[in-house]
Amino acid sequence: MVVRDFEMDRLPFPLAVVVQGIYTIKTGRHVFYYEDQEKGPRSPETDRDSQSLEDVQRPYYAPVVTRDALQKIVGVARECSNGKHCVADWNARVHLAVLDLALHNPSFTERICFMNCNTAQLQPESLVPSWPHLTEYQLTSKMVDFVVCLRFDNDDDLECMRDILLESNPQSLSINQTLHDRLIAAPIALSIFTKRPDQTWDEAQLQISVWVAAQFKRLNQLVQCRWGGEWRKHAYDFLPFIIIDGHEWSFLAASLNGIGQTVICRKIMFSDTMTESGVQQILAVLHWIAVWVQRTYRRWFYESVLDMAMPGDGHY
């Protein structure tokens, strides 16, 4: 594993767009909160054919939420922090509520979904051999807490996915790096990990990085099955993930370098759950990433994995 800073001039363009949007939201300069939203929410432009990062400098409306909802999250987060609650409490009482506010709305529910997956384990064959030896405990313990996935309800899409799975590896009938029931036919786009208080940052980063490296391996298997020797032209450039450490939410991303090593871009701590405005910024970043999932990643998955045109245009 190689760890480095986010360097805008070295990032794949789709990742540069996502990162620039996160930095913009982090400053608060272009996020309009609930009291300013007279006309309702408006999505940012993240079309992969955009020619400039200026597209993400436009004013961006975060999801519309009530002040009561924000105050409740802040209050419960403080209770969890002051009471030194376990990760399970944070996930059930704070993080699930944040994800629900950000993602469970008509803009996304037909195309993406999120779920708790803290019992999902890696398939042994999806592990990358070059990674450090992992103990049995590490392999059977929690890998991540939540995932945001592409949603496929169309019978033709599901049939195409089944055919690809049979071709790529008949022994592994999952589109992902895990055989967790709910994730077999729901391609993961974003993984979220809640760090334990007794974990170091390096330990948390290693754990989710193993998960993401296995995801890269599985995606590349699927793309190779579809495109053969030209698969590298169709492989995706990066996979995003989030690590939550107490109140703080941080964005990271993984990519593969020319020799197949996993490269992790160091965290961007974009907000926290200590204030109402902090929670609203988290909602805005999640909403921003969800737009990328719905429009850019979903289009790539249709074209490069399923080898078919994406229904609709991905806009909403």
Image (cartoon, rainbow, N blue to C red):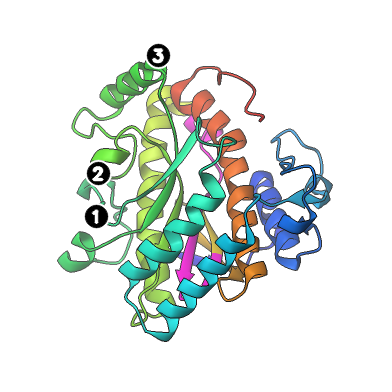
Callout 3 secondary element: helix
Type of amino acid at the residue the image marks with label 3: Asp
Specify whether residue 152 is painted magenta.
no
At 24% from the left edge and 44% from the top edge, which residue is drawn? 180
Residues under numbered marks 2 and 3 in contact, where contact means CB atoms less than 8 Å apart: no
Type of amino acid at the residue the image marks with label 1: Thr
How packed is label 1: few (under 14 Cα within 10 Å), some, or many (20 or more)? few
Quadrant that contains the N terminus: bottom left
The disc placed on residue 156 is 3
Q: What segment carries the magenta color?
A: 231-250
How packed is label 3: few (under 14 Cα within 10 Å), some, or many (20 or more)? few
Type of amino acid at the residue the image marks with label 2: His
On the image, numbered disc 2 is attached to which residue? 180
- Asked if residue 4 shows in the view, the reply is no
Judging depth in this view, the residue of 258 and 107 nearest the camera is 107
At 82% from the left edge and 44% from the top edge, which residue is drawn? 52
Query: Where 185 falls versus 4 (above or below)?
Result: above
Judging depth in this view, the residue of 123 and 312 nearest the camera is 312
95 relative position to 265: left or right = left
